[in-house]
Amino acid sequence: MPQSLAVNLIHLVFSTKNRKPLLVETVRPELFAYQAGVLEKWNSPALRIGGEADHVHILFRLSKNYPLSKVVEEVKKSSSKWMKTRIASNADFAWQNGYAAFSVSQSRVSDVERYIQQQPDHHRAASFREELRLLLGRHGLEYDERYLWD
C-alpha cells in the first residue's frame, strides 16, 4: 500500500492536580475550545470535550504522525498555561501527572460523545474517583490504587 492510513479514536480522561474543583462552569467552554485548538494543531481533531470542575474528558482522533503521550502532553501543558493566565487565582493551576486513555471503536463514538455530554448528570450520582475506577475496569486496565491519584 503506497500510503499510510489510520483511524485511532481516543477517549482521554485527566483531572486537575489533587482533583481541585478549579474548572468553574464559566471557564469550561473557553477551556474546551482552547484544548480543541491545541489538538487541531497536532492533527488530532477533537470530536467532543466536556467535564466537570475537577476533570476533563476528550474524545479525539489521534493523528497517525504523533504518539498519544506527546499529544496529551501538549494539550495538558498548553491548557495549564492558559488556565494560569485566564484567572488570577489560578496562578498555581496544574493538571494531575497522569491520564487515562481508552481506544474507541467507530461504532461506539456516539455513545462516548453522549457520555461526555452528560457529565453533569453523571456526577450527581458518582464522584470522579468512582467514575475513573469504573472506566478502568470496563476497559480491563489493571492499576495500582497507590499511584492512581496525585
Image (cartoon, rainbow, N blue to C red):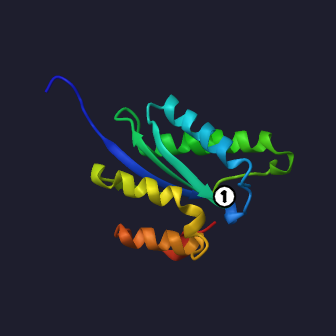
Tell me if residue 58 can be seen: yes
> Relative to residue 84, is residue 45 drawn left or right?
left
Tell me the amino acid under the disc marked 1: Thr
> Relative to residue 42, is residue 85 drawn left or right?
right
Kindly identify the residue that appears in the image at 68 percent across and 60 percent down: 53
Tell me if residue 98 can be seen: no
Question: How many callouts does the rendering have?
Answer: 1
Quickly name the residue at label 1.
16
Q: Quadrant of residue 143?
A: bottom left
Q: Quadrant of the N terminus?
A: top left
Q: Residues within 10 Å of mark 1 (few under 14, many from 20)?
A: many
> Looking at the image, which is closer to me, 89 or 47?
47
Q: What residue occupies the far top of the structure in this picture? A: 2
Kindly identify the residue that appears in the image at 74 percent across and 55 percent down: 24
The vertical placement of 70 against 147, above or below, is: above
Give x and y (percent) for residue 47: 45, 43
Kindly identify the residue that appears in the image at 44 percent across and 53 percent down: 113
Looking at the rendered structure, the secondary structure element under dot 1 is: loop
Give x and y (percent) for residue 45: 45, 36
Q: Quadrant of residue 122?
A: bottom right
The vertical placement of 52 against 2, above or below, is: below
Q: Quadrant of the C terminus?
A: bottom right
Q: Quadrant of residue 61?
A: top left
Give x and y (percent) for residue 46: 48, 40
> Relative to residue 105, is residue 70 drawn left or right?
right
Kindly identify the residue that appears in the image at 75 percent across and 51 percent down: 93
Q: What residue occupies the far right of the structure in this picture? A: 88
